[in-house]
């Protein structure tokens, strides 16, 4: 049974309820994974989403910060969450579909402004979070699984608008790229987006600070879809809906899609 999955850092699901509903109507993904929901679970505005067919949800939330949710048209049961680096943050949730596929939804810490853990606690937390993700996947190797989310790292040179200019900017520093690579390797994860779109500049995030984000096009690919090798060949049709970044009062992220024939 084919299903289409989307991942989107929504930057407040309550503030942007209308945008989520619009995406649901226009794209009708079977599964929509949201990050940075900034809401307790009980206050996620599910009435409209359920009316659009998204009758299943697994989520972790907290007031005003972080938060992850998986909204699904397909039956799904929660299979746990992890608090990596013991931050006490709502940054991970996992759900399992009836076909046995487990979907992990992550919101990795952004890491602050300075890429130096000696002066920036948030950067150290980010590295520690990734290290514990790596160790978890190494100890419990995933199978028949998909990992999505805002991983807050653009790993490849063509995942950013300027590799040289961003080497010392949080999200593209060599140490972050190394940590993300180790995490990916530990779970034997396949980068589905780049499997489908192997060449060329590709972004999913554009800063609010840019006066004209579209013309400046100083983007980064921070949002990812990975899959384990046993199902990676079933994935296709990856794309990023860049135009969503231009909707009224948008998130600074665009949704990323992939379809799996499973």
Image (cartoon, grey):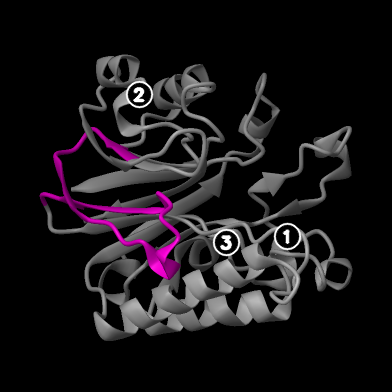
Q: Secondary structure at mark 1?
A: loop
Q: Residue at x 53, y 35 (%)?
A: 10
Name the side, left or right, on which 241 lies relative to 87: right
From this view, report whether residue 39 is shown above or below residue 65: above
The residue under label 1 is 201
Secondary structure beneath label 2:
helix
Q: Nearer the viewer, residue 161 or 34?
A: 34
User: Residue 66 placed where, x, y %?
Assistant: 49, 44
Give the residue drawn at x 25%, y 23%: 53
What residue is shown with label 2? 43
- Residue 242 relative to residue 92: left or right: right
Numbered label attached to residue 197: 3
- Residue located at (65% from left, 66% from top): 121
For residue 68, which quarter of the picture? top left
Q: Tell which circle, 3 or 2, labels the residue nearer the N-terminal end.
A: 2
**x, y (%) of residue 249?**
67, 21
* The C terminus - image quarter: bottom left
Residue 200 showing in the rendered view? no
Residue sitting at x 33%, y 78%: 137
Find residue 57 and report its image quarter.
top left
């Amino acid at each position: 049974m084919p299903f289409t999955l989307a991942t989107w850092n929504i930057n407040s699901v309550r503030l942007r309820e209308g945008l989520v509903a619009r995406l649901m109507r226009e794209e009708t993904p079977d599964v929509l994974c949201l990050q940075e929901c900034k809401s307790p679970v009980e206050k996620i505005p599910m009435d409209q989403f359920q009316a659009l067919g998204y009758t299943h949800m697994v989520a972790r939330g907290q007031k005003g910060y972080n938060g992850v949710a998986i909204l699904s048209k397909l039956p799904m049961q929660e299979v746990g969450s992890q608090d990596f680096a013991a931050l006490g943050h709502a940054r991970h949730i996992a759900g399992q579909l009836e076909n046995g596929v487990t979907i992990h939804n992550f919101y990795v810490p952004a890491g602050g402004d300075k890429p130096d853990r000696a002066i920036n606690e948030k950067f150290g937390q980010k590295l520690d979070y990734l290290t514990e993700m790596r160790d978890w996947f190494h100890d419990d190797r995933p199978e028949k699984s998909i990992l999505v989310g805002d991983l807050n790292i653009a790993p490849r040179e063509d995942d950013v608008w300027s590799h040289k200019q961003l080497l010392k900017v949080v999200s593209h520093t060599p140490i972050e790229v190394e940590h993300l690579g180790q995490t990916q390797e530990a779970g034997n994860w396949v980068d589905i987006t780049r499997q489908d779109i192997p060449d060329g500049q590709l972004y999913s995030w554009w800063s609010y600070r840019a006066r004209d984000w579209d013309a400046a096009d100083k983007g980064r690919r921070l949002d990812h879809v990975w899959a384990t090798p046993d199902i990676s060949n079933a994935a296709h049709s990856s794309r990023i809906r860049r135009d969503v970044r231009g909707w009224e009062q948008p998130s600074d992220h665009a949704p990323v899609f992939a379809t799996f024939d499973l």
